[in-house]
Image (cartoon, helix red, strand yellow):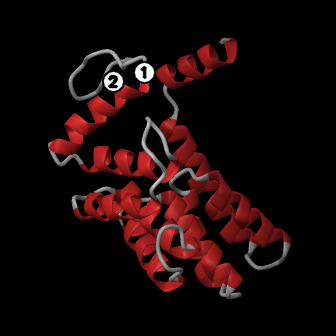
Amino acid sequence: MHDCPFCRTPYPNNDVEEMAMIQARVDKKDPEAINLLAQAHCHGLYGKLKDVRKAVELWEEAAELGSNDALYNLGSAYYIGEGVQVDEGKGGEFYKMAAMRGCAVSRYNLGAFECMKRNHANAYRHWLISAKMGYRNSFSSINIMLFEGKVTKGQHAEALKGYQDAIEEMKSHDRDEAKAKRRCD
């Protein structure tokens, strides 16, 4: 349970060994490993110097290879201008691509953008999809919209049912056991 999902060896105890494991997967063009390497460059982790431009290059490579997390990270980078010129349109496009591939947080962000433009119907649609994926912030935003009179009770009920169904579907004995163990530590 605490071993590398690729090679089944125990996780290393230091940054150098962990970076070596990530690099081995990067060399095999694993998009999620490339995304992790980009995160290391973005935040200065695992002994890497902080280099956001390098992170953006790596996220672009990981996105081309299929990493949804890299698409989300690119959306964030362009939206706030981290390592690249601010380009909210391009950031939104990356969020759209990630959302279309199932990223609940990207879908939530798209809803927030629509809400800022006062397009509450589109915001609701994005947040409904994300809430049905079990993303709490989207359901909370729909609650606020109900309070403000921007959605109907029926729309709120649909979101509540979808959110509850997603949470119920994600429940498992192993998750409950792990959560209980973390509380004891």
- Which element is circle 2 on? helix
Q: Residues within 10 Å of mark 1 (few under 14, many from 20)?
A: few
The spot of residue 163 in percent (x, y) is: 60, 52
- Left or right: 75 with respect to 179? left
The three-letter amino acid code for the residue at tag 2 is Glu
Q: Quadrant of residue 112?
A: bottom right
Label count reads 2
The residue sitting at 58% across, 65% down in the picture is 108
* Residue furthest to the front: 49
Q: Is residue 35 above or below residue 6?
A: below
Q: Is residue 95 left or right of residue 160?
A: left
Q: Nearer the viewer, residue 171 or 114?
A: 114
The answer to which of 184 and 134 lies nearer the viewer is 184
From the image, tell me which residue sits under label 1: 14
Mark 2 highlights which residue?
17
Q: Secondary structure at mark 1?
A: loop
Q: Are marks 1 and 2 in contact (CB under 8 Å)?
A: yes
Q: Is residue 161 above or below residue 94?
A: above
Determine the residue positioned at 55% across, 47% down: 165
The percent position of residue 9, horizontal first and vertical second, equals: 26, 16
Query: What residue is at 44 percent from the left and 59 percent from the top?
Result: 103
Kind of residue at badge 1: Asn
Q: Measured from the top left, where is residue 174 in percent x and y? A: 48, 20
In the picture, which quadrant includes the N terminus? top left
